[in-house]
Every structure is written in structure tokens, then in C-alpha cells.
């Protein structure tokens, strides 16, 4: 590492210390913030290794499958999330430090302070997507510079791993392909090699989907899409999201110094990074009036649009880094305050019961600790079931119709095997609707408990009636979530095989 000069900006001179400070804040957030619903859901995947899962491709499940035998502590689970959230910053510094060490450090800090990455300490499907998207794009850049076939093939393999992380990798593939066809057409054979490298990942995904009810296709292309209308106002929401993500000051300096940025991008042949960032964001802009765009959707593509900052003036970079650092500090203070404050401080809020479940989940887990393994635990939500499973240290299923999200329990729970068993049902916010449970048991006993000031009613269901549950719950699920469109090739589906034969 180049020794800092006294003439460098303060932030550049203290880059190493700032990096360690940010790492410490991330570790504190990872330690104190309770496991989220999505994280807990992915932990269910990690405990059940497979070639795919209901909602998404399998990569995050594979990662967690490797970690869980070692430890299920939040820091262990979130270690990959912490590393990947810092990976863009570290990559920028390592790549550019020999060219311009000051700018390398300041732009690295911009990536480190970017709100989306500063607060990202969880390990989710976006985690491996970000990592492999960075790798695939960097390898493509190297391939275009060298023209060597091996680099194109490696870029394809990395893109395939991104595809096995999340389907947003398709947008990156489109962006890289369009860049080659439009701006580097002489490398069209290299594009074929990239496609060849992706093929194994696509084959694995198709094989699993064919043998598992086409779950990923049904979720992403059929079940999750309702009758959404056209709302041009969503463009404004999306614009605000982009301003928040890239910060107003950085966008201001981009607009003021666009000529210098253009010269630097052309001189250093950064076009492929620009395409990898801009094309997916333009696609989201086209989708915005029809679909709400989530901030995390942008995570895999945003880092590429920080690279032009390497060609801003030193003053612009220094100002941007200071302002971004202040914004990051504010985020850290807010998150750690919420995590460390007792949940009772939210007692006056309407959704206090939700706060108890997600901010003090160990309290809910303690309420069911007295029930032995003869009792099968269920909630009505995949998120709550997954969180309770993590903190209670036992399996918790989903009872009732659920939603189009998080139906991994369809693969895991065989309700036929529970016929006659005793089930413990935890209602969503403590308020029990007996219509949700009484029709499916010989007897239901209600147990009233208090959890952090919330009156919670637990339903102890004795003698589960599978026939009634099949007729009133499973059959509508089959009709609603397993109505395969004619254009899908016929494959295997354990869920339909399991439950369509009951009525005979």
C-alpha cells in the first residue's frame, strides 16, 4: 500500500482506519440486529440442501449449508453479507490504487458509504449475486481488453454462478451481450463463449425446476403477478430511490463534470461497466410504472456506476466522500439505536405485536419452549415460521393457505403424516381467529400468555384432521398455486402427487 502523503485529503490519509471503523460498525449491527424474516427463511434452505428452492435459485442455500455445520450465530451467518457489502469498495481500491491512490481511496469510501451497502450486513439472495456480478463484469472487461478466449469463458462461468444466485443476473447477461454486440462486435465469438459458460448453470436450474413443479417459473412468472395497473407516479418513486442510492451530491458532480467523466471512460475502456450498470437500471425504469422497484433490486448493478467517479476532481470527490460518510454515520446510529432499545419503547404503536415478534423474537421462542417434540409448531406466515424456527431451534411449519411468497414449506411439510397429531398454532399478532384452526382438529384448547405486554393466544390443536384440511386448505392451494399454464412442459411435482390422490 502506498504511504499516505501529508498533502492528501484527510479521508484518503486515514483510509485504513476508516475501513476498520466501518467494519466494526457492521459487526455490531450484525451482532445486535435480530435475524430478519428473509434471513431466517434462507436458513431453512441451508438446513435442507437442494439444487433449487421455491422462490429462487439455490446459491444462498448452498452457502448457508456450508456455514451452518460450523455455527448458527448471527455473526457466522452474516459474515458473507458483511464481506460482500464491502467487496465493491475493496475491489475499487485494489484495482485503481497503482493508477491514482488518492482517487482510489476516495471512490472506495464512496462505495463503502453508499447507503445500500453500508447497512447491508445480512446474507440474502442478493449477496452472492453482487459478488458474482462483480466478478463476471470484471472478467468481461479483461476479456475485451485481451481478446483471450479463456477470459470470456471464465466470465460466462461467473455469470452462471450469478444466475444460480438470483434471476436478476439475466439483466446483467443482457447488458454484457448488448455491449459486445453494439460496441465490440469483433468479439462476437467471445460472446458465444460467455453463453457457453452459462449453460451448465441454466441446465442445473432447468433440471431442478422440471422435477419440482416448475417452482421458480411459477413464482416469478405466474403466481406473484396480480392485476397491477399502470401508475406513472412510480417513476417519481424510482427517481427518488436512485437519488437516495447514489446521493444527491455525487449526482450533482456527475452532471457538472460529465465531459471529464466521458473522457476517462473512453480512455480506460470502462464502457462495459457503464453498460452493466445503466442497462439494468433502464429496464427497471421501464418496469417502474407497472411494478414497485425495490432498493435491493439495484444492488448488483449500482457499484459499476461508481467507477466514473474516478475521473471527478479531487475536490468533488473529497466533498462527496465527507457527505456520504455523514449519511452513513446517521444510518448506523439509527439502526443501532433501534436494535439496542428495549422493544417496549414501541408499545404505543399499532403494530407493536409485529415489533415484538421481529425485534424480540427470543421472547416468542421462550413462550413455546415448554412444548416437546410431540407438538408440531406452526404459524400462518413463512416469515414468522422461519424466525421462530431459528430462535426456538426446531422446525416450524406454515398452517393455512399462506401467500405466493415463501412457499418452501410446500416442499418440506407432508400434512398426511400429521393426521391425528397435536399441533401448536401461533396466530400472527396474538389475536386468535378460531375459524383458522377449529375445523381441522378434534379439539382446540386456547392458552393465553403475555409476551412483552402483548396478550397472545396459542391454539393447542388435538387430533389433526387431514381430510378436512385437505378439502378446505390444500385443495384450494392446488387450484391456485399449482395451476400450470399450458406452455410449461409437463414435469414432476411432489406436491400435486402427494395431495391430488387423497380424494380418491
Image (cartoon, rainbow, N blue to C red):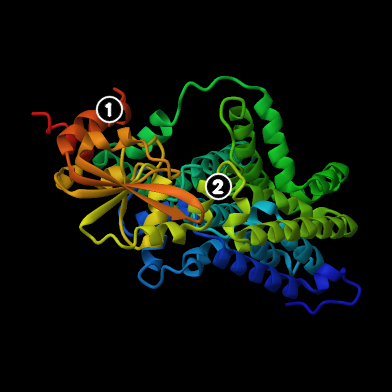
In this view of the protein, which residue sits in the foreground, 107 or 185? 107
Residue at (33% x, 45% y) in the render: 408
419, 427: nearer the viewer: 427
Does dot 1 land on a helix, a strand or a loop? helix
Asked where in the image residue 372 lies, by quadrant, the reply is bottom left
Q: Is residue 61 visible?
A: no
Residue 434 image offset from top left, x and y in percent: 32, 36
Q: Residue at x 12, y 33 (%)?
A: 502
Residue drawn at point x = 45 percent, y = 69 percent: 73
Asked if one can make out residue 332 in the rendered structure from this viewpoint, the answer is: yes
CB under 8 Å between discs 1 and 2: no
Say whether residue 357 is left or right of residue 208. Answer: right
Q: CA distance from mark 1 to mark 2?
A: 32 Å
Mark closest to the chain's N terminus, 1 or 2: 2
Q: Which residue is mark 2?
A: 352
Quadrant assignment, res 435: top left
The x and y percentages for residue 357 are 48, 52
Q: Is residue 209 left or right of residue 309?
A: left
SS state under label 2: helix
**Disc 1: which residue:** 476
29 lies above or below 430: below
Mark 1 residue crowding within 10 angstroms, few (<14) / some (14–19) / many (20+): few
Side (left or right) of 254 relative to 180: right
Task: Identify the residue at image location x=48%, y=21%.
Answer: 227
* Figure quadrant of residue 102: bottom right
- Residue 288 picture location, percent across and down: 61, 29
Q: Position of residue 181 (x, y in %)?
A: 58, 37
Specify the quadrant that holds the C terminus: top left
Q: Which mark is residue 302?
A: none
The mark tally for this picture is 2
Amino acid at each position: 500500500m502506498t504511504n499516505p502523503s501529508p498533502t492528501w485529503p484527510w479521508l484518503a490519509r486515514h483510509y485504513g482506519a476508516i475501513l476498520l471503523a466501518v467494519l466494526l460498525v457492521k459487526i455490531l449491527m450484525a451482532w445486535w440486529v435480530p435475524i430478519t424474516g428473509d434471513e431466517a427463511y434462507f436458513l431453512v434452505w441451508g438446513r435442507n440442501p437442494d439444487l433449487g428452492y421455491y422462490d429462487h435459485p439455490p446459491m444462498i442455500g448452498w452457502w448457508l449449508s456450508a456455514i451452518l455445520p460450523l455455527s448458527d450465530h448471527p455473526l457466522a451467518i452474516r459474515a458473507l453479507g458483511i464481506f460482500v457489502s464491502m467487496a465493491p469498495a475493496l475491489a475499487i481500491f485494489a484495482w485503481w490504487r497503482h493508477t491514482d491512490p488518492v482517487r482510489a481511496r476516495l471512490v472506495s469510501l464512496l462505495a463503502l458509504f453508499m447507503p445500500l451497502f453500508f447497512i447491508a450486513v445480512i446474507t440474502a439472495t442478493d449477496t452472492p449475486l453482487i459478488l458474482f456480478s462483480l466478478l463476471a463484469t470484471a472478467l468481461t472487461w479483461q476479456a475485451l481488453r485481451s481478446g483471450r478466449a479463456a477470459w470470456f469463458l471464465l466470465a460466462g462461468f461467473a455469470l452462471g454462478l450469478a444466475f444460480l444466485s438470483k434471476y436478476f443476473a439475466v439483466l446483467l447477461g443482457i447488458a454484457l451481450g448488448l455491449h459486445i454486440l453494439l460496441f465490440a462486435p469483433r468479439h462476437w465469438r467471445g460472446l458465444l463463449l460467455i453463453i457457453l459458460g452459462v449453460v451448465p448453470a441454466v441446465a442445473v436450474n432447468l433440471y431442478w425446476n422440471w422435477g419440482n413443479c416448475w417452482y421458480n417459473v411459477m413464482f416469478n412468472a405466474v403466481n406473484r403477478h396480480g392485476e397491477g395497473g399502470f401508475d406513472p407516479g412510480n417513476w417519481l418513486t424510482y427517481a427518488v430511490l436512485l437519488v437516495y442510492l447514489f446521493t444527491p451530491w455525487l449526482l450533482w458532480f456527475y452532471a457538472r463534470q460529465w465531459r471529464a467523466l466521458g473522457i476517462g471512460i473512453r480512455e480506460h475502456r470502462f464502457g462495459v461497466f457503464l453498460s452493466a450498470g445503466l442497462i439494468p437500471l433502464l429496464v427497471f425504469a421501464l418496469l417502474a410504472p407497472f411494478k414497485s422497484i425495490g432498493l435491493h433490486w439495484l444492488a448488483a448493478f449500482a457499484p459499476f456506476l461508481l467507477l466514473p467517479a474516478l475521473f471527478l476532481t479531487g475536490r468533488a470527490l473529497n466533498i462527496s466522500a465527507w457527505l456520504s460518510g455523514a449519511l452513513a454515520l446517521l444510518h448506523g446510529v439509527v439502526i443501532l439505536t433501534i436494535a439496542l432499545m428495549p422493544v417496549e419503547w414501541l408499545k404505543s404503536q399499532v403494530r407493536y405485536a409485529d415489533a415484538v415478534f421481529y425485534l424480540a423474537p427470543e421472547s416468542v421462542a421462550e413462550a413455546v419452549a415448554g412444548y416437546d417434540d410431540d407438538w408440531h409448531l406452526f404459524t400462518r406466515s413463512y416469515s414468522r415460521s422461519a424466525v421462530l424456527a431459528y430462535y426456538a431451534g426446531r422446525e416450524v411449519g406454515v398452517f393455512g393457505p399462506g401467500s405466493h411468497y415463501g412457499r418452501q414449506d410446500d416442499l418440506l411439510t407432508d400434512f398426511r403424516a400429521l393426521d391425528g397429531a397435536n399441533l401448536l398454532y401461533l396466530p400472527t399478532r396474538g389475536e386468535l381467529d378460531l375459524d383458522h384452526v377449529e375445523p381441522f382438529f378434534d379439539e382446540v384448547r386456547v392458552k393465553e400468555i403475555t409476551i412483552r405486554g402483548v396478550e397472545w393466544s396459542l391454539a393447542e390443536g388435538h387430533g389433526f384432521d387431514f381430510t378436512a384440511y385437505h378439502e378446505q386448505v390444500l385443495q384450494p392451494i392446488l387450484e391456485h398455486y399449482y395451476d400450470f399454464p399450458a406452455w410449461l412442459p409437463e414435469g414432476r411435482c411432489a406436491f400435486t402427487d402427494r395431495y391430488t390422490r387423497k380424494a380418491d
